[in-house]
Every structure is written in structure tokens, then in C-alpha cells.
Image (cartoon, rainbow, N blue to C red):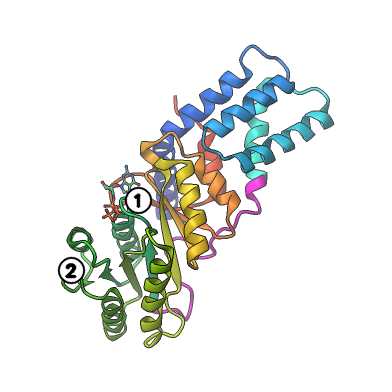
Amino acid sequence: MSFFNKLFSREKKESLDQGLQKTKESFLSKIGRAIAGKSTVDAEVLDNLEEALVSADVGVDTTVRIIERIEDRVKRDKFLGTSELNRLLQEEIANILVDAPQTEYRDFEIPPGKKPYVIMVVGVNGVGKTTTIGKLAYNFKKAGKSVLLGAADTFRAAAVDQLTIWSERVGVPIVKQPMGSDPASVAFDTVQSGVAKGADVIIIDTAGRLHNKIHLMDELSKIKRVMNKIIPDAPHEVLLVLDGSTGQNALEQAKQFTAATEVSALAITKLDGTAKGGVVLAIANNFKIPVKYIGVGEKMEDLQIFDKVEFVDSLFSLKN
Ligand SMILES: Nc1nc2c(ncn2[C@@H]2O[C@H](COP(=O)(O)OP(=O)(O)OP(=O)(O)O)[C@@H](O)[C@H]2O)c(=O)[nH]1
């Protein structure tokens, strides 16, 4: 590993550790309370642990799977001290995440033969969609890629304005039309311009909201249809942005969106401001769609490619 790669991965770890601080403190203290005053893992400890995991937003399904695995270990090993429980829990969380899908393309690379790589971004109001697009643009640019943004969320003037601010902040061009224009027309213009410019990555903001399932499906399929006139397999990625600080609501939103439209990757934002980061485990464990990015702050540097091993490690490493 080169010096710069090492430096980068240390920075990434620090930022993840810091971003997950609230979740970690709450998660580990709940586990601590679950085993307080006990020397062995008995049925009561398991009950308390189950409660602790559910209340840390790990989700019922995921919690049940974790507890079952710990129960098996307790049966197998006969005696298990509570001091081993943290390590055991970390192992079992990591084990159930082994099957969770993970993206193939790491570190803001684009798959070969997919230039321009078209990302369509969907999500309800306020989840951090625009911020995530800005952060993505920053990271792709930093990785040496040329980026073009498309402001196809034309329903609110503020959405276009905010994306314009991000395009200026990051220093990447943007394609936009007046508010109320046809989103599909903006998407078409953006893809056309991206191809003409030889852009590596095109990121399209959509008003892909969930107020009306039919409307959402129609709008997104229209955008897709017009893009396909220029690039037959675009969009290469449909990224659903979820607000991690809403805990189980984020899980619910992911269920609804994935039922309504074809989503290929997930971004979970605002993990820094919340103790509900356990929801990442529930989402990673519940969907066939990979969690690709996590947001751990408001700045453009605060987006990370999700790595399940690093995430679980960080969750159990509390800073003094
Ligand atoms: N702390 C923190 N704040 C975030 C993160 N991502 C986004 N935000 C904040 O969340 C708020 C909403 O973000 P936007 O990007 O405007 O959300 P949006 O989904 O585009 O919302 P609309 O523009 O209303 O559609 C802003 O104040 C962002 O700074 C994150 O990872 N951490």
C-alpha cells in the first residue's frame, strides 16, 4: 500500500469512527446495561441483549438472527462469560453481514466500458439527496474523473439552486432548465451534453419522491426512456438516498422505494448526528441491494464507500 493510500485509509477510519461516535456510545452502553451484574450469558442476558439491539435500531429480523446465533454458541460452548459477549457479538454481526451484498467498484472507480457512467439519484425530500450528489461529484473529481450534474428535480426552485451551489463548490458543470420544466428533458440534455463533453460520470438529481407510487414509476421510467435514446443501458446506477437518522423509517422507505422502482444501490446519510446507526446493519442485512455509500457529516469529504467489515469494526471500537 502506498504512503498516500495508507494516509487516506487512516483518514477514512478516523472519519468513520468520529461519524459513528453517537451510535457507538449508545449501542455499547445498551449492551453494557444488558449484561450488568451478570457473569454468564444466560436467558435473561439474551433477553436484555435482544431488547438492546432492537432499541439500537438494528431491526427485529436482524436482531433475531444475531440472538439465535449467540444462543447456538452459548449452547455449544456451555459456559460463556459476559466479558466475551462483546467479541462474540461483533463476530456474529460480522458473520450475518457476510451475505450482505457489497459493491464491486471501490474508491470511486467506474466499471470498464461504462463511460459516461450515469447515476440517477432518488429519495424523499430532506434525506440529503443534494448533499450526497455534491459529495459524490467531489469524490469522483478527486479520483480524476470529469463529472457533469443534471438538475432534473425541477419541482422546487430550491432544489436546482442547491445543486447549483454544490456544482460551484466542487467545481463541476451543471445542466439545468427553468423550474417546472420536464425532468426527462433535463435528463436528456444532461446525458447529451455529457457525451459531447466526454464526461466520465453524469449524476442526475430527480424528484423521485414517493408521494404517489404510480407517479414515481412513470416519472422515472420516462427519464430512463429518454436517456436510453442516447445511452441504451443508462442509468447504470439508480441510487436511493436514505436518512439514517430516521432509524426504522429509513428501512421502511427502502422497502417502499424498492417495491416501486428498480434501485441498484443505497446511500445512508446523516449517521454522524444520530445514535440510530444500527439501522445500517438492518438495511444491509435486509436487502439484495448493496449499501454503497454512507454520509458521516455535512462537508464534501464526509461521504464514504460503505465497507461492512470496517463498519462493524468501528462500531465496537470506542474512543476514550
Ligand atoms: N450531519 C449531516 N448532515 C447531512 C448529511 N447529509 C446531508 N445533511 C444535511 O441534511 C440537510 C438536507 O440535505 P439536502 O441535501 O438538502 O437534502 P435533499 O434530500 O436534497 O432535500 P431537498 O433539497 O429538500 O429535496 C442539509 O442540511 C444537509 O447539510 C450527513 O451525512 N450528515
Above or below 204: residue 31: above
**Is-magenta flag for residue 64?**
no
Query: What residue lies at 60% left-to-right and 49% top-to-bottom?
Result: 285
Which of the two labelled residues, at mark 1 and mark 2, occupies the earlier sequence position? Answer: 1
Q: Which residue in the structure is indicated by mark 1?
A: 127
Q: Amino acid at mark 1?
A: Val
Check the image and name the residue furthest to the top: 37
Crowd rating for badge 1 (residues with CA inside 10 Å; few <14, some 14–19, many 20+): many
Residue 150, percent from left and from top: 27, 71
Per the rendered image, the range of residues in magenta is 96-116
Q: Amino acid at mark 2?
A: Met
Instruction: Place residue 120 in its image quadrant.
Output: bottom left
Number of marks = 2
**Is-magenta flag for residue 111?**
yes
The answer to whether the residue bearing label 1 lies less than 8 angstroms from the nearest atom of ligand 1 is yes
Residue 119, percent from left and from top: 39, 69
- Report the mark closest to the observer, 1 or 2: 2
Residue 269, percent from left and from top: 39, 48
Q: Is residue 36 left or right of residue 161?
A: right
The quadrant of the picture occupied by the C terminus is top left
Above or below 309: residue 21: above
Q: Which residue in the structure is indicated by mark 2?
A: 179
Query: What residue lies at 37% left-to-right and 39% top-to-bottom?
Result: 272
Q: Is residue 294 visible?
A: no
Above or below 229: residue 75: above
Q: Secondary structure at mark 1?
A: loop
Q: Secondary structure at mark 2?
A: loop
Q: Is residue 23 visible?
A: yes
Residue in the foreground of this view, choosing between 230 and 216: 216
The secondary structure that dominates the magenta segment is: loop
Label 1 and label 2: CA atoms lie apart by 21 Å
